[in-house]
Image (spheres, grey):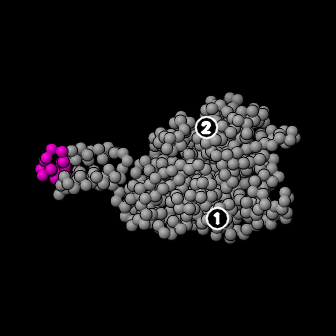
Amino acid sequence: MVTATKFCLYTSILSQTRRTLSMGAAAACALLISACGGGESSSTTSEQDSAAKSAAEAEIAIPTLDLEKTDLTFGFIKLTDMAPLAIAYEKGFFEDEGLYVTLEPQANWKVLLDRVIDGELDGAHMLAGQPLAATIGFGTEAHIITPFSMDLNGNGITVSNDVWAEMKPNIPVMDDGRPVHPISASALKPVVDRFKSEGKPFNMGMVFPVSTHNYELRYWLAAGGIHPGFYSPDDVSGQIGADAFLSVTPPPQMPATLEAGTIYGYCVGEPWNQQAVFKGVGVPVITDYEIWKDNPEKVFGISAGFADENPNTTLALTKALIRAAIWLDENDNANRPEAVEILSRSEYVGADEEVIANSMTGTFEYEKGDKRAVPDFNVFFRYNATYPFYSDAVWYLSQMRRWGQISEPKSDEWYDETAKKVYKPEIYIKAARMLVDDGLANEADFPWDSDGYKAPTPAEDFIDGVPFDGKQPNAYLESMVIGLKGTQTIQGSEIVD
């Protein structure tokens, strides 16, 4: 029999494991009032006992793992693709796993990475290139791994109003006068050429040297015949031989920097492209979905040491993040309006709901008033978005090699081995199996038999029409018109074979 005392214990536990009460918990509390409030606890009926126990236990997911660490601090940058962290926190998925998490916004990507390496953060929302670059020693050296890919797509490239005005005559239009998308960087090339002929640098912003944004911007520019520049061991500016000069600008500062004229365009995640539209300072010309359909974006990064010392905690946090991703995409994005409200709060992204909703709820606004349906602009779970594929890692490594961040040629085997040091699908799959066994996820939603590599990406999924096979990175690099390949290296400002 469930006495009032026991029921009070159930609800006490419930209050510690939920930040807010659902309707089920509210019903349980009504029974608590009946059982505890009137001095009638001894007469609690068996029906009330059963209902109380069921209501409480339905709200409590008792951890089945012996957790090595329960109090965790995770970092993030104020972008909409940090959503799985916010949702796992707000919906109680972390607490269901016995984890008590603090989420802390970070000043920039370097600070975030350094704090994970130093152990001040237990993990963080990271640029997909960060764990890879750190592990191979480009920049700060440390072994960082990822058991969870946070999303697909979510970025855009924006140019200033003046640059857009110069580009428009070079862009074909539809019958209604709106530009045909996707827009090639070849429409930007005459503008860049004019700057060059006048001796002026054409400056563009990206968020970090090993960010998806850097590689996507470079990919788009190169596909349109604009050289984005090389890196070398002696010059890490990334501007060797450049037509367009790319440099780091923190995401929230992008629109203001564009408005000030310091840069003429940028690549960034949301909501900072849509913010430029709302402020009237710029025009997003292309999304990363149009550069590479369903491209991987952010990952959740932890140190290899943390994972080794806390294997069950690592599984538990991965389970919570998978549940958050499912929630974000389920029922054809039915939960996105609620997610937008959560993300708009100052402790998360802190942008207006309307700005976040402009891309988060299945649309994307290019030129002011030109809002188009892009249902997959933000993907958090479908298409195996959360599975950490080795092929995703190989693509990032191939771009590091293409632009000289990896200065020497590497074998295909090296790419495979490096990907496997960082991306950990074995952790992900174990966490997914536990969720399925607990009835919290569907068997059909996970790639159980994957060897860690996606099927080759077809030519039509890339803006330049070049297919990608993660098992053949050197052949992929050979197919690029602009970029290092084979045995090529950068010496001074020259390519040497």
Q: Nearer the viewer, residue 469 or 11?
A: 11
SS for callout 2: helix
Is 234 inside the magenta-drawn segment?
no
Residue 51 visible in the displayed image: yes
SS for callout 1: loop
State left or right for residue 130 relative to residue 45. Answer: right
Residue 461 visible in the displayed image: no
The residue that appears at 50% across and 41% down in the rendered structure is 346
Residue type at mark 1 is: Glu
The residue that appears at 73% across and 50% down in the rendered structure is 218
The residue that appears at 71% across and 57% down in the rendered structure is 399
Local crowd size for mark 1, using a 10 Å CA cut-off: few (<14), some (14–19), many (≥20): some
Residue underneath mark 2: 274
Residue underneath mark 1: 141
State left or right for residue 334 relative to residue 394. Answer: left
Q: Quadrant of residue 385?
A: bottom right
The residue that appears at 34% across and 45% down in the rendered structure is 22
Furthest residue toward right: 197
Q: Nearer the viewer, residue 363 or 121?
A: 121
Give the CA separation, mark 2 to mark 1: 35 Å
First to last magenta residue range: 34-49
Percent x, y of residue 405: 73, 60
Percent x, y of residue 451: 57, 66
Q: Nearer the viewer, residue 336 or 450?
A: 336
Q: Count the marks: how many? A: 2
Percent x, y of residue 248: 69, 48
Q: Quadrant of residue 169?
A: top right
Q: Please name which of the two marks, 2 or 1, marks the residue nearer to the observer.
A: 1
